[in-house]
Amino acid sequence: MSDQTWQIISMVIYLIGMIYIGYWAYRRTVGLGDYMLGGRGLGPAVTALSAGAADMSGWLLMGLPGAIYATGLVEAWIAVGLTVGAWLNWKFVAPRLRAYTKVASDSITIPSFLENRLRDKSRMLRIVSGVIILVFFTFYVSSGMVASGVFMKQSFGMEYHVGMLLITAVTVAYTLFGGFLAVSYTDFVQGLMMFFALIAVPIIGLFAVGGPAEAARSIRAVNPDALSMVTGATTVGVISSLAWGLGYFGQPHIIVRFMAIRSVEETKQGRRIGVGWMMLSCLGAIATALVGVAYFQQNPALKISNPETVYIAMGQILFHPIIAGFMLAAVLAAIMSTVSSQLLVTSSALVEDLYKVIGRREGSDASYVLLGRLGVLTISLIAAALAWSTTSPILKLVAFAWAGFGAAFGPTVLLALFWRKLTAKGALAGMVVGALLVWLWAARSGGIFDYYEILPGFIGNLLVAVVVSLLTHHHDEEIRVEFDETVRQVRREEAAAEG
């Protein structure tokens, strides 16, 4: 049996497993709350790993190892920024968002939470938030579909469109039928696959190159500065890389997990699992790249044409073809976990934040679940059409979307959770300014415009939201009561967790 046949068997097992989880979740999904938020019943481990898997996408297994392989540890600053941002997000945002979304009329989406929290009678805040999510995530999903098509072509020689449609069909199927539960549990499995793959490759690889000392010698023979995080670094590059961490506070497909965890008390355990998973996975990705440099230096007859395939190449060299197949599936898992999470959040924005508000129609939970599924299908078709003949650089689009969400929602979410005086007008003005600054900044280059666009967008949103809120603030007793109740709940449950 050929190596590729073994790998195809692994891939088929993986895809069937994802479909089965979707079927399992479908049987447990009854109402809209189940479909969009899993009935707020996720455990800390599932919450943590699903958030991590939804976040990392193929960047963790291909983008980061590729950058380290090509340039050295100087490219690791982005991993530092993301890890710090993830820890801050779990520490400060997760407990308050879980409590506050429940207190504020049991909100099940970020736009509905902002409307309920700020008593926005105009409903513009919810509509604008929903439109931002709908537009950005449709293109974001499209980039994931492109990545899946390219992956299937490079790994199995499959025609781009066939590969894209196959993976899209499986991802859409379990998302459409199983909703939030399917997305969360498939993300959990996919997160485990990514973790074990990134730990196994560098450990086995170290034995193959003769141990850490020989690995370091071979790496320095290729690039004397490869093991330095300082040599070759620039102020703009380091600050921009660290600034990626700011994006966490405003990523709807990540922070929605905080709303779904069983209790505030369990966010502490979730933080330990999630940040631990992220640190070890990032270290594994970095180690995979460095071991790859050493291995190919010692074996000059073997070469890789694309640095981003170093993880795939090492997996195929070091392991039996069926294990290598599951390692290939881990790359696909990273892509699918992000796409499915984005599809669901976009569907919830379409139904919960646009259809319900603009249409002003009341319906049964069953009808809303049906609309949610139709929303997943519709968005998938639009994204697939955009991905059919796209030539857009995937990583650039992802970076732009990450900055857009981080700048538009990050400061707004933080102020909503921690500042009583935030107003609907302040939030709306800040959100618009943040999104526009990202758009305008990204279109320029040179000088200060070389800094990552999330920085001006985030700062601009924060300043405008605070100034406009101070100018438009008036006392609202209901808002004060809800805010104080949220603080009490968080403190009570955190104290219980400490005890």
Image (cartoon, rainbow, N blue to C red):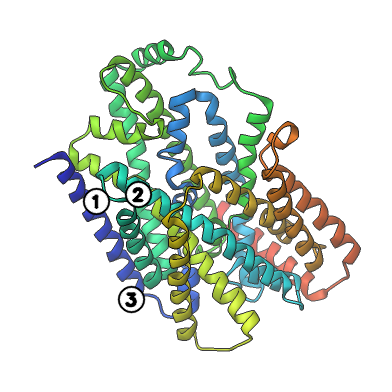
Contact, CB < 8 Å: mark 1 with mark 2?
yes
Q: Which label was assigned to residue 473? A: none
Q: CA distance from mark 3 to mark 2?
A: 26 Å
Residue 326, given in percent of the width and then of the height, sits at 26, 45
For this view, does 155 lie left or right of residue 428?
Answer: left
Quarter holding the N terminus? top left
Residue 90, given in percent of the width and then of the height, sits at 58, 50
Which sits earlier in the primary sequence, circle 3 or circle 2? 3
- Please give the residue where the numbered disc 2 appears in the rendered image: 332
In this view of the protein, which residue sits in the foreground, 115 or 296?
296
For this view, does 465 lie left or right of residue 183?
Answer: right
Question: Within 10 angstroms of label 1, few (less than 14), some, or many (20 or more) residues?
Answer: many
Q: Residue at x 44, y 65 (%)?
A: 380
Amino acid at the residue labelled 1: Met
- Please give the residue where the numbered disc 3 appears in the rendered image: 27
Q: Residue at x 60, y 81 (%)?
A: 356
Q: Viewer-nearest of labels 3 and 1?
A: 1
Question: Within 10 angstroms of label 2, few (less than 14), some, or many (20 or more) residues?
Answer: many
Which sits earlier in the primary sequence, circle 3 or circle 1? 1
Q: CA distance from mark 3 to mark 1?
A: 25 Å
Contact, CB < 8 Å: mark 3 with mark 2?
no
> Which secondary structure lies at badge 1?
helix
Amino acid at the residue labelled 3: Arg
